[in-house]
Image (cartoon, rainbow, N blue to C red):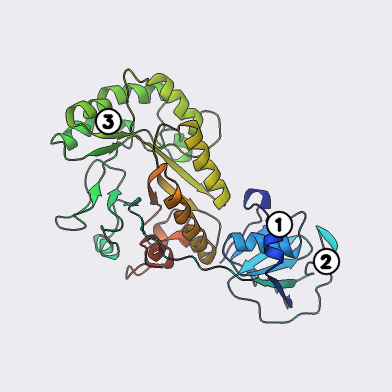
Amino acid sequence: MWKFIFISLTTLAVINVSAVRSSLMNIGCYADFNLGSPVMNDAVTNISSNTPEKCASYCTSLSIAYSGTENGNECYCSEVPPTVKSDFCTTPCAGDSKQICGGVNALSVAFTTIPSLPATNSTKRGLCWSWNNNVSTFAFFSPSSIPWLYNWELWDPRPVGIYSTAEYIPMCRTAANAPKILYHLSKCNAKRLLGFNEPDLPEAKGGYYISPYDASVLWKNYIEPMKTRCNMTLGAPAITSSTTPGMGIDWLQQFFGNCTASECSFDFLPIHWYGKSLKNFQKHVTKVNELFPNYPLWITEWQFTGFSVVATTNLIKQAIQWLDAQNYVERYAMFAPKEAARMNSMPNAAMITDDLSGLTNAGKIYAGLL
């Protein structure tokens, strides 16, 4: 069953009412039967100062053309309009009592023209390839347009001759992996090495936590020597976007305090982000760059959560165009080239179709085909 949640608009979009007002076209009042899910269900939010213009601005920030207000303060978005007319749009808008914002089971629907974004390609893009991905799905991507991959491991997941021209980048994912680095990379068979994966995430939340001090000791003993031995480019530990004390940026700053320039070197800074807003994604990436301006950024995991397939796909297209335009973002890998069932509660962002026969629209966008 389709599920939705109401999310505060302030976390999702910056309202640009004046830009929307000039292109907004009201198309009428339509019934919303609320039988399990809203009629307009690509995105949903609750706006305390709701107006048709503010709702439309929220929807257009997701590249969704149809917006609908209901019960004064509710806002719904859809790629297609409702079909059943209603006479019950009588509720004043929460943000302007002179305007009507739907009613009980009734939507005041508007249409806004959405500019089409062209397909893009960027060699910044890589694949975060799970160890249990079906090898056949490599065929859906081109190493000329997505020229690197990693798999959270120290061993290359590709059979001989498959996606072979792409660069494989190993990762020391956990503390237990650190002593195994030399075994896997004794022949200096990689140019780059990714550090620990989300060492700031507690085990209670599914992570492999490493304290900043312990991580610094492991780095000095096992990771830093690979720069001397093999001249490898080293990526710092990839942190979550959590703002909880001891996690995210706070963890990284503590780690850098224990792993100083005289003993540790870092050539780029990988980060992760999952959330519900393009603006928040941009804000987080920008903040990390401002705090650590000397390091190129790699966003090695990122994705939007809580939206429909359509809204998620639209956000992905906007996000990759923004990432491509940021000079300090050196590389990024979107989560994930998988089918919906293996997307860790993010099925609407799957890049591979359920039957493993091809790419979803999200996958086509990432591959530069749509």
Q: Amino acid at mark 2?
A: Gln
**Residue corresponding to mark 1:** 46
Residue 283 quadrant: top right
**SS state under label 1:** strand
Nearer the N terminus, badge 1 or badge 3?
1
Q: Do we see residue 8 in this rendering? A: no
**SS state under label 3:** helix
Q: Amino acid at mark 1?
A: Asn
Q: CA distance from mark 1 to mark 2?
A: 17 Å
Nearer the N terminus, badge 2 or badge 3?
2
- Residue shown at 28%/63% (left/top)? 137
Q: Do we see residue 111 in this rendering? A: yes
User: Which numbered circle lies on residue 99?
Assistant: 2
Residue 130 place in picture, x, y as percent: 32, 51
- Disc 3 crowd, CA 10 A, few/some/many (<14, 14-19, 20+): many
**Residue corresponding to mark 3:** 178
Left or right? Give the position of 137 relative to 10.
Answer: left
- Residue shown at 50%/31% (left/top)? 291
- Disc 2 crowd, CA 10 A, few/some/many (<14, 14-19, 20+): some
Identify whether 3 is placed above or below 39: above
Residue 195 place in picture, x, y as percent: 33, 34
Identify whether 258 is placed above or below 314: above
